[in-house]
Amino acid sequence: MTKEIHKKTIKRLDIDETLPHQISAPSYEGTGIKMEAPFVNKHGVVIGDSMYASKNSPLENWTEESDPAIMSGDEWVHPTNDIGWNTTENKEILESKRKPKAYPFMHPSKDVGKGTD
């Protein structure tokens, strides 16, 4: 995303690296990925505020002459508040970035507890 798109930002929605208002939203805590605030794109549409209708959105002003390509590109996708993060596959990506809960008190590559139970 270009810097000019990020010039206008609005209030952050995250609390402790998660979006509590979304029941299925993943937690970014411990992943190294920082939650980002919503932003206003060049069309004047707020992206990442969890309000999916905007008076400036091409979707709200669609006509038969509208070119669907107007809504393509990075300016329409929020890096951390996008519905795609709620999928199982993307939650697994976030989970793989977390250190094990036993860290730092476990061996990084040997399971010393194997066969002890």
Image (cartoon, rainbow, N blue to C red):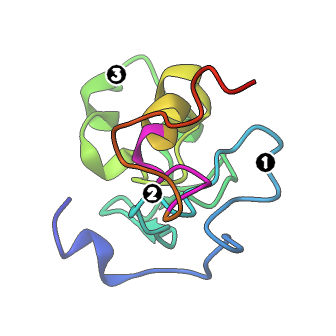
3 or 2: tag closer to the N-terminus:
2
Q: Are marks 1 and 2 in contact (CB under 8 Å)?
A: no
Q: Amino acid at mark 3?
A: Glu
Residue identifier under label 3: 65
Considering the image in quadrants, where does the C terminus appear? top right
Q: Nearer the viewer, mark 3 or mark 1?
A: 1
Q: Report whether 79 appears left or right of 15.
A: left
Inspect the image, locate mark 1, and give the three-letter code of the amino acid beneath it. Answer: Gln
- Horizontally, residue 6 falls left or right of residue 2, namely right
Residue identifier under label 1 = 22
Q: CA distance from mark 3 to mark 2?
A: 43 Å
The quadrant where residue 101 appears: bottom right
Of residues 2 and 95, which is closer to you in this image? 95
Residue drawn at (44%, 69%), measured in percent from left and top?
Answer: 34
- The stretch of residues the image draws in magenta is 96-103
Whether residue 22 is visible here, answered yes or no, is: yes
Where 78 sits versus 62, above or below?
below
